[in-house]
Image (cartoon, rainbow, N blue to C red):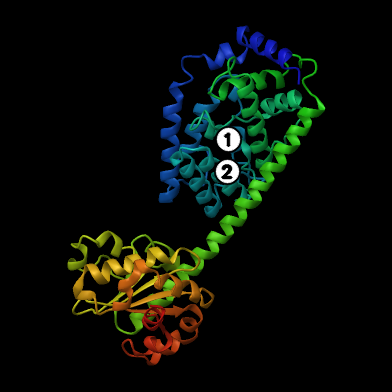
Amino acid sequence: MDTKAVGRLVEHWRDDAGGTYQSWFLWDQRLKNFRSIRRGLLAVVAEIEAGSFGNVYRGSSLETVIHSIAEQRQIFRGADHAFLWKPKLRIPDIYEHRGNQQAFGRFLGACLCCTEETGLVEAIHELDRQAIKGLGPAAANLLYFLHPTLAVPFNTAIVNGYNALTGAKVKLGRWEAYLAMRQGILALNVEYRTQLSNDLGAIAGFLFDIGSGRYPLPSGANTPDAVSQWEADLARVREESVASRKALAAAWEEDLTHTQVQGWLRDLGRALGYAVWIAANDRGRAHAQGTLGEGCLPCLPAALEAHRAADAIRLIDVLWLDPISDQVVAAFEVEHTTSIYSGIVRMLDLALGVPDHFGARYFLVAPKTRENDVRAQFARPAFSRVSELDLRFLPYNALEEHREAMARFGFGMKALDAIALPMVQHVAASG
């Protein structure tokens, strides 16, 4: 790329009274819309979460937001086209499909809340994974007004300008192509920073004017090196997307298993006649056509709520309590793949911090394959007082195999004690 030629074109663009720099980027009304658009998107998210968004675009809170964007002069003219309901094509599929609508709401909510690039990019990857028909990178125009230094506006003219300048092959409907274009635009913005702005609207306007044919392409702009850089950017975005998908799948599987085991313990405890507490941060998780906290205690007994360790105790995965005395009978920490350390600390906070509950049973629930990890943690000098407690290891497979029989025929803690493995003997032997 002939950087001098491009630099001269940028200067010409800045001085052009009819170009987007003078007519839009420096327009005193431009920045005033940022706050109103953010406020409008907050309303969209709130309506989607409440189920009151409706199933049409016309008259919706989203139409109000998009109308504000489309009024941003020529660069955003037609921004509403991607969101208009096209009944024959049934796109964008966020009006009649409740699940897609909720995914769109989560996307907007995540982007409203995030403050860094990683959060923004992950929100885009998550939306892309939903494969919602008709909801492509045009949604990036919403993101620009939330994060003007991180998100690049997107339309046909901007894409054409970027492709012409760099030799890239950005496709209008592909999020991966948008993310790769964004990387290239960020690099261009750094290269011409003194002539452009941290606000990516400036370089987007420059590309818009090139793509709309206002300026001829500078000689030597589209070179083999530029094309190679585009291909490298696209390959990197694809790798990031695959890595993100794998990480999400692993996290989803872990959450699913963790919730499932908590559900087993919840149902077993209630069947045995105990009151059940589910960790405060897990009560709302979906489970068995309901939520994990259904039928469980809404708050800890007063003695525990008032204790200085209450914040930690509230996060213990499952507690079984005597419904009459409010005493904790058993405490369970479920550790699928996460650190065992924090679970032990929370149970020690309960056992050692609240003497009345010292005699409860304490269980570390994990896959059988993690038994050695569990025992190694119990043997750490930092947990020397573990030997004073009735701490046990409860393997998933034993709980799954026997839980229904225990629920039907069991009484008290005897059956559970029979399938759990004591840790105390190991700790004593290791000394």
The local secondary structure at tag 1 comes to helix
Report the Cα–Cα distance between label 1 and label 2. Answer: 9 Å
- Horizontal side of 220 relative to 79 (left or right) equals right
The residue type indicated by label 2 comes to: Ile
Please determine whether, in this image, residue 155 is positioned above or below residue 89: above
Q: Is residue 145 above or below residue 234?
A: above
- Which quadrant is the C terminus positioned in? bottom left
| 427 or 308: nearer the viewer | 427
- Residue of label 1: 140
Q: Secondary structure at mark 2?
A: helix
Give yes or no for contact between labels 1 and 2 (Cβ–Cβ under 8 Å).
Answer: yes
The residue to which callout 2 is attached is 124
* Residue 164 point in image, percent of width and height: 76, 24
Where residue 44 appears, x then y in whole percent? 45, 41
Nearer the observer, 79 or 207? 207
Q: Residue furthest right?
A: 224
Residue at left offset 21%, top offset 63%: 305
* Residue drawn where x is 47% and y is 68% of the image: 258
